[in-house]
Image (cartoon, rainbow, N blue to C red):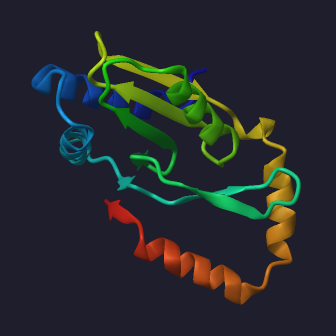
Amino acid sequence: MLLEKDLSYIIQGCIYNVSNKYGKGLKENIYQNVLKEEFLAKGLKFESQKRIDIYSFDTGKKLGTYIPDFVIEDKIILEIKASYITIAQDIEQQLSYLRISEYEIGYLVNFCSEELYIKRFIFTNNRKSFLKTRIDTNENTDEHESKNTDEHKSKNTKKHE
């Protein structure tokens, strides 16, 4: 069974529509803006430049923040590239973000490579031992600290519903 099959199909359709209409050679931010239009036209909920906290595998403490191009329906991370080649570092980075976040599906898209590059990545949460560690640690966290983090997140996230 394909994880998030219907949503993945819609997202891929949006990507192909953008590629067919605009071709290659534009800047990354142009592709991002056109994808926003496509997602809105399809009725998808998405967040642009959502801040995703990354936690230690061992302690569950926050290590830093990752800011993907899109998080769609709070289920799928989408990273956009506009370079002539897709390098191994781009692929490894996307895999790392899935491996150390609560998201299970990610897409890496390069609109400017020789042919449209779309790669779907899966890293299911049942393979992420740090999630248990983080949940245990968060239960012992001061509630005030948690509220401040949530307020900071809401101020820095651009939501589209």
The quarter in which the N terminus is drawn is top right
User: Which percent across, then down, holds residue 64?
Assistant: 64, 59
In percent of the image, x 26 and y 31: which residue is there? 14
Query: 37 or 9: which is nearer to us?
Result: 37
Q: Is residue 69 above or below residue 6?
A: below
Residue 4 appears left or right of 62: left
Query: 71 or 61: which is nearer to us?
Result: 61
Residue 9 seen in this snapshot = no
Check the image and name the residue furthest to the left. 21
The quarter in which the C terminus is drawn is bottom left
Residue 37 seen in this snapshot = yes
In percent of the image, x 79 and y 35: which residue is there? 127
In percent of the image, x 40 and y 55: which residue is there? 49
Residue 102 appears left or right of 20: right
Instruction: Say which quarter of the image contains residue 133.
Output: bottom right
Residue 85 appears left or right of 134: left
